[in-house]
Amino acid sequence: MNVDLLAHPAEEVAPQLLGSVLTCKTPEGTVSIAITETEAYSGAADPASHAYRGRTPRNGVMFGPAGHLYVYRSHGLHWCANVVTGTDGIASAVLIRAGRVIEGKDLARERRGERVESARLARGPGNFCQALGITAEHNGADLLTGTSVVLSEGESVPAALIQVGPRVGVSKAHDWQHRFYLASDPTVSAYRLSPRAKPPAGA
């Protein structure tokens, strides 16, 4: 993966990451997942972003440089992985929402549960990280030159297969068309509107 591809705003990079492969190597083994769903989050202009109110110890990785992994805990339960994009010093990242396991399926299923269907092994950001074995220790990992977690180019995805829609489960800026996913792909997570989301003014 070339850093030049990532050195752009998240909403430009997010659709280009579809088809790319994220690989995580752990003592238990290696799992690789082809990305099928992403969401873009920027900084001060994005009310749904962790960086909306500025830089903190928690979100510091999100401010760059591009090509690193930003990992955070969602609702105290699940780890979520983001690819940092854009210009160093300006917050921008792409949340990886779902993917298709292409290597290490047995290990991914061991982590997720023996009865989990193949299409659901990495469906949803928390499940994606669980299948890969990504945790807080991977926060800040260099995806381009590192060895534990690596982002690489995969199969090219035709533009006609890419669908665009609102982000899932966020209460602010929930109607922004910053979610990108492969049409009719069974690994893509279901859309869910946050119960705390407020309708646009005048609606």
Image: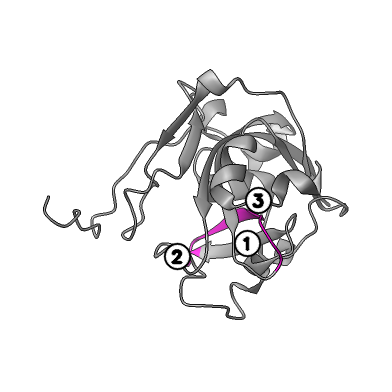
Q: Mark 2 near mark 3, Cβ–Cβ under 8 Å?
A: no
Image point (53%, 27%), residue name: 119
Q: Mark 3 near mark 1, Cβ–Cβ under 8 Å?
A: no
Of tags 2 and 1, the one toward the viewer is 2
Quarter-of-image position of residue 38: top right
Q: Is residue 85 magenta?
A: yes
Q: CA distance from mark 2 to mark 1?
A: 21 Å
Residue 52, percent from left and from top: 46, 71
Which residues lie in the magenta part? 74-88
Q: Would you name the residue on which mark 3 appears? A: 8
- Dot 2 or dot 1: first in sequence order is 2
Q: Secondary structure at mark 2?
A: loop
Image point (77%, 60%), residue name: 141
Q: Would you name the residue on which mark 1 appears? A: 71
Left or right: where 152 falls relative to 38: right
124 or 121: which is nearer to us? 124
Q: Secondary structure at mark 1?
A: strand
Q: Amino acid at mark 3?
A: His
Q: Quadrant of the N terminus?
A: top right
Q: Would you name the residue on which mark 2 appears? A: 45
